[in-house]
Image (cartoon, rainbow, N blue to C red):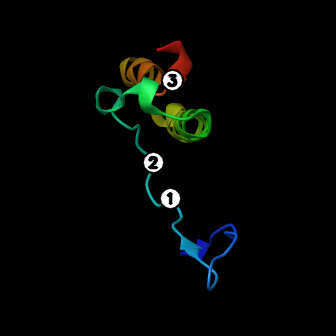
Amino acid sequence: MVEAPSVVGAEKPLNAFDTLTLAPIDRRLIEPDMLTAEEVRWLDRYHARVAGSLAPLLDPPTHDWLKAATAPIAAA
C-alpha cells in the first residue's frame, strides 16, 4: 500500500493501492458516458502504461490486439 492523497475532513491518513500487474481493462465492461473526465484520463493513462510496458515484448498480432485494447477511450 501507498499513502493516498489527503482528503479534506478525513480523520486520519488514507492508504491506496499500487498496481502490481498490467493488463488492459476490458472495454466491453465500460460505459464511457458514465465516466467523469477524470476517470477517462485515469483509464487512458493506465492503458498507455500497459501498452508502453507490454508492447515491446509481444509478437506482431498480439501487439496489434494490445494497441486496439489500450486505445484512448475517446477514440473508441
Please tell me which residue is depicted at 56% across the width and 75% down the height of the picture.
15
Tell me which numbered mark, 3 or 2, is placed earlier along the sequence: 2
The amino acid beneath tag 2 is Leu
Depth check: give the residue in front, 35 or 28: 35
Q: Are marks 1 and 3 in contact (CB under 8 Å)?
A: no
Question: Dot 3: within a 10 Å radius of its alpha carbon, few (fewer than 14), some, or many (20 or more) residues?
Answer: some
Residue 19 tag number? 1
Q: Which residue is mark 2?
A: 22
How many C-alpha atoms fall within 10 Å of the one at disc 1: few (<14), some, or many (≥20)?
few
Quote the CA–CA distance across marks 1 and 3: 20 Å
**50 to the left or right of 59:** right
Residue drawn at (43%, 17%), measured in percent from left and top? 64
Residue type at mark 3 is Ile
Residue 73 at x, y percent in the picture: 51, 23
Give how far across and how far down residue 29 sits, in percent: 30, 33
Q: Secondary structure at mark 3?
A: helix
Read off the residue under disc 3: 73
Callout 1 secondary element: loop
Q: Residue furthest top?
A: 75
